[in-house]
Image (spheres, rainbow, N blue to C red):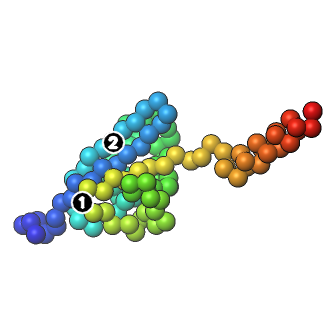
Amino acid sequence: MSSTGAEMLTVEVAYALPHKQRLVALSVPEGTTARQAVVLADLPALFPELPSDAFLQAPLGIFGKALRTPEAEILREGDRVEVYRPLAIDPKAARLERAKRQASDQGR
């Protein structure tokens, strides 16, 4: 334990657009949650083209595993928090549309 009372952890926060990616290395106090790390990474400054609140409720994961409660997920040394973009289209809706197109193509 350090003299400040809290150990510091090194973690990363990742976000990507199709044309631009950023990985932010942070030193955070032990007990920091995934959501807190995203706030500390200051992603709105790195992605000014997005609304500043885009990262506040975004789904999060750690090394590709989605988190159900990122506000409660305590980070460990070396974790990489990933901020996920919203899906452009619901996967179920996309499958339904493909099936309809295929059915109409076969009926010709």
Look at the numbered disc 1 and give the secondary structure of its residue.
Answer: loop
Residue 97 in the figure: left or right of residue 76:
right
Three-letter residue code for mark 1: Glu
> How many residues crowd around disc 2 within 10 Å: few (fewer than 14), some, or many (20 or more)?
some
Look at the numbered disc 2 and give the secondary structure of its residue.
Answer: strand
Residue 68 in the figure: left or right of residue 22:
right
Q: Can residue 15 be seen in this view?
A: yes
Residue lying farthest right?
108
Rendering quarter of residue 78: bottom left
Pointer 1 residue? 77
Using the image as rendered, state which of residue 76 and residue 46 is in the foreground: 76
Using the image as rendered, state which of residue 56 and residue 103 is in the foreground: 103
How far, Cα to Cα, is label 1 from label 2?
Answer: 16 Å
| Badge number at residue 23 | 2
Residue lying farthest front?
106
Q: Please state the horizontal and vertical placement of residue 71, each as a whole percent of the image.
A: 42, 65
Q: Is residue 39 visible?
A: no
- Residue at position x 66%, y 45% from top? 89
Q: Please state the horizontal and vertical placement of residue 75, each as a whole percent of the image.
A: 31, 63
Reading the chain from its start, which is encountered first: label 1 or label 2? 2
> How many residues crowd around disc 1 within 10 Å: few (fewer than 14), some, or many (20 or more)?
few
- Residue at position x 43%, y 54% from top? 64
Quarter holding the N terminus is bottom left
Q: Please state the horizontal and vertical placement of residue 29, each as a whole percent of the image.
A: 22, 61
Quarter holding the C terminus is top right
- Residue at position x 86%, y 42% from top? 103
Residue 87 in the figure: left or right of residue 21:
right
